[in-house]
Amino acid sequence: MKQLLIILGLFSSLLTYAQVTKSKNASFNLREVAMLSIEPNNNSVLLNLNAPNEAGESAQVTSNNNQKWINFTSAIGENASKRNLSIRIDNGNVPSGVHLKVITSNYIGSGRGQLGSPTSTLTLNNSSQTLVSNIGGAYTGTGLNNGYKLTYDLEVYDYKLLDFDNSETLTISLTLTDF
Amino acid sequence: MKTILLITSILITSVCYGQRINIKGTNWNKTFQASDISNAGSDYNAFYESSSNQHRITFTSKPKNNYTNNYAIFALSIHKEDINWHPNLNLEVKRTGGSTNGHTLYYGDYYRTVTNNSSLFLYSRGNVKNIPIQYKISGISVLLPAENYTTRIVYTIMNY
């Protein structure tokens, strides 16, 4: 009987099998990303202040190409601070008597993520102002009708300061920044 | 009694054997940055693949045994052990060719997800040499926190 048990025990050991393992790593390093573009193009916005047709009417603003779309892609670290999209006049001066305004739409498009919160209307000057705040990991989608639509406009605040022969070219910068 | 023990010892020696597995090639490391994104407003591509022979796997019986190296069934299983991983990431694996010694391989020639549970990847009759292995990663996105994600890909060889 003992011999039988030994044989059975040894044969059962034959049913087990050895195994050997080896490994390799796969590693993916996702860097922080901040990308910004103006759509449909970077061409100049043209805003004209025209004399009224009749005495007593307000001056008329006509514009060409005054709407732009902001597309961006943003990737940040787990504990990194969120980002702002800021705007400022980099070069040039707004003509006397008028304000240069920018109106920002709510987010529209096929993007995903933490797309931020827009400031609806800003009066532009040489200081940086927040256009969209609290941007996290996100992408807006590309091209027109994706992202935030910016509409530039002029607003007369003092007629006596207007100089109708005046023309100014301004450089406006948009920056995606950490805060 | 002595005779029985002798016979069984001989049987054990002739039937029990081990295996040896070798994986050639470096770890698959990839950095994702702005240059990998086509336009502002876009995300990363849907997936990325390693080279078609990122790893080359060889397995044999140990000690060398003519019978097992030519006729035994070898089963190669795979799983991953996460070091720092994100649930949105999906790692897949496939072989892109056969064994250079001509032994037949079964399965493994289409992408399958590598999970944390070991499962059969492929099997062969006889030992194999330099099976080319390719990987695919999907789920890479700017929506994931920007950091380093690493997992250990573990191959287990068994034979019967």
Image (cartoon, rainbow, N blue to C red):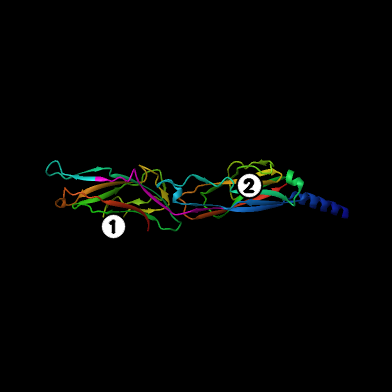
The amino acid type of the residue labelled 2 equals Ser
The residue at 63%/47% (across/down) is B119
Question: Which sits in the foreground, A1 or A173?
Answer: A173
- What residue is drawn where x is 23% and y is 48%? A154
Judge by depth and name the residue closer to the eye, B6 or A164: A164
* Circles 1 and 2 in contact, beta carbons < 8 Å: no
Q: Is residue A14 left or right of residue A71?
A: right
- How crowded is the residue under tag 1: few (<14 C-alpha within 10 Å), some, or many (20+)? few
Q: Position of residue B23 (x, y in %)?
A: 63, 51
| Amino acid type indicated by mark 1 | Ser
Q: Label 2's element?
A: strand
| Local secondary structure at mark 1 | loop
**Does any portion of residue A1 appear in the rendered image?**
no
Q: Name the subunit of mark 2.
A: B
Q: Give the letter of the chain under mark 1.
A: A
How crowded pointer 2 is (Cα within 10 Å; few <14, some 14-19, many 20+) is rated as some
The picture places residue B76, in percent across and down from the top left corner, at 66, 47
The range drawn in magenta is A26-46
Classify residue B155 as left or right of residue A107: right
Q: Which residue is mark 1?
A: A127
Q: Nearer the viewer, residue B84 or A63?
A: A63
